[in-house]
Image (tube, helix red, strand yellow):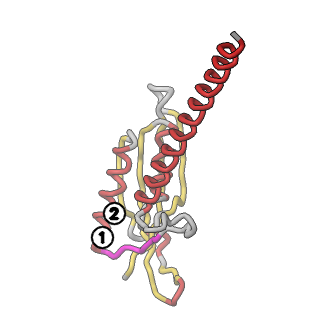
């Protein structure tokens, strides 16, 4: 009787430990999959985690329409309705010297948007992650008169263009 009683307690303890081991192995496999996905999405062999910086570039005159289209695509992906988008070529009306004594002209991009507050945040976050240099110069947010969850946004972006 003692042998059966002790054997049943030991087998129950072994089952509990094997369940815990299986759960830990599953968690480790999930962690390894996530790390692999992070490395793959960063586009570098080592994952790019130690770099911390992304490559940005200044566009040329010919790339302005492509930039406007990319901004419109980012807006559409974030449920933002663009009422108007317009490049402002004489933005601040002067050339600004940038590192290396190269001359770049400043291009302003005026936008009138209708969107939700959180959608606007996602849009601005994706603009920040763009390869091109895009800065938010000015932003005005006002509630839309018909829908309390929609905002009217007047946004002024600034970018640099190679001459």
Residue that numbered label 1 is attached to? 63
Looking at the image, residue 108 lies above or below residue 105:
above
Q: Which residues make up the magenta segment?
A: 55-61
Percent position of residue 81, x then y: 36, 41
For the C terminus, give its image quadrant: bottom left
Residue 158 lies, with reference to residue 151, above or below; the image says: below
Asked whether residue 73 is drawn in magenta, I would say: no
Residue 162 position in % (x across, y down): 38, 80
Quarter of the image containing the N terminus? top right
Residue 60 on the magenta segment: yes
The answer to whether residue 51 is above or below residue 143 is below
Quarter occupied by residue 40: bottom left
Tell me: 67 left or right of 153: left
Q: Position of residue 39 (x, y in %)?
A: 45, 59
Q: Secondary structure at mark 2?
A: helix
The residue singled out by tag 2 in the image is: 67
Secondary structure under tag 1 reads helix
Task: Tell me the residue at 68%/13% (across/down).
Answer: 5
- CB atoms of marks 1 and 2 within 8 Å: yes
């Amino acid at each position: 009787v003692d042998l059966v009683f002790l054997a049943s307690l030991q087998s129950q303890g072994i089952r509990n430990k094997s369940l815990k081991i299986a759960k830990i192995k599953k968690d480790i496999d999930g962690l390894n999959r996530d790390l692999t996905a992070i490395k793959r999405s960063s586009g570098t062999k080592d994952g790019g985690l130690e770099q911390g910086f992304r490559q940005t570039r200044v566009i040329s005159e010919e790339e302005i329409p492509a930039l406007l289209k990319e901004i419109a695509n980012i807006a559409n992906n974030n449920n933002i309705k663009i009422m108007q988008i317009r490049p402002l070529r004489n933005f601040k009306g002067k050339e600004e010297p940038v590192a290396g004594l190269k001359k770049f002209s400043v291009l302003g991009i005026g936008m009138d948007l209708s969107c939700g507050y959180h959608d606007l945040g996602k849009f601005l976050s994706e603009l920040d992650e763009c390869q091109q240099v895009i800065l938010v110069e000015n932003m005005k947010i006002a509630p839309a008169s018909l829908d309390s969850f929609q905002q009217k946004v007047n946004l002024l972006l600034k970018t640099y263009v190679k001459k």
